[in-house]
Amino acid sequence: MSFDEINPETAKPWTRAELFATLEHERAEATEVLKEVTYYDGPQADKSVIISWPEQAANLRARWAIHQDEFAIAIKDLKTLYKSVQVFIENQQEYWATNPLLKKQ
């Protein structure tokens, strides 16, 4: 059985043994990386994974402040858009008043 893919190290098609050896090497590296991963790095990471109520309240307040800022920015953008549309409509009204579709004779 032969493979169409070329091994970049040997510049020849992969053999079954090379593929299996590469697979085992990648699995070993992935296992090492998974061992180093920590799922929680908070102040009480070594004590417990459960987040305390004060930490949750502080997180909620911080997130609420972010949402308020984003909402204020959205309102400001909507007001700017409204003013731009208003100016556009006024310009169009002036244009059609001075350049009617059917000219009077």
Image (cartoon, rainbow, N blue to C red):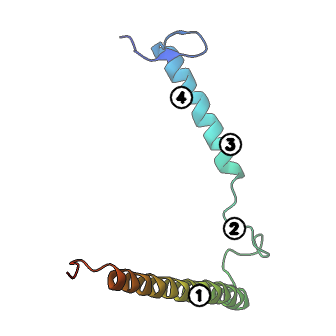
**What secondary structure is found at the residue carrying circle 2?**
loop
Q: Which residue is more in the foreground, 104 or 69?
A: 104
Q: Which residue is more in the foreground, 94 or 16?
A: 94
Horizontal and vertical percent position of residue 61: 68, 91
The quarter of the picture where the N terminus appears is top left
Q: Quadrant of residue 48?
A: bottom right
What numbered label is drawn on residue 40? Answer: 2
Mark 3 → mark 2, Cα distance in angstroms: 18 Å
In the image, residue 22 above or below residue 37 = above
Q: Residue at x 51, y 22 (%)?
A: 20
- First along the sequence among labels 2 and 1: 2
Residue 35 relative to residue 21: left or right? right
Q: Which residue is more in the foreground, 65 or 49?
A: 65
- First along the sequence among labels 3 and 2: 3
Amino acid at circle 3: Glu
**What secondary structure is found at the residue carrying circle 3?**
helix
Q: Which residue is more in the foreground, 75 or 18?
A: 75
| Crowd band around label 1 with a 10 angstrom C-alpha radius: few (<14), some (14–19), many (20+) | few
Residue that carries the numbered disc 4 in the rendered image: 23
Q: Residue at x 60, y 86 (%)?
A: 67
Residue that carries the numbered disc 3 in the rendered image: 32
Mark 1 → mark 3, Cα distance in angstroms: 50 Å
What numbered label is drawn on residue 22? Answer: none
**What secondary structure is found at the residue carrying circle 1?**
helix
Q: Quadrant of residue 90?
A: bottom left
In the image, residue 15 above or below residue 35 = above
Amino acid at circle 1: Lys
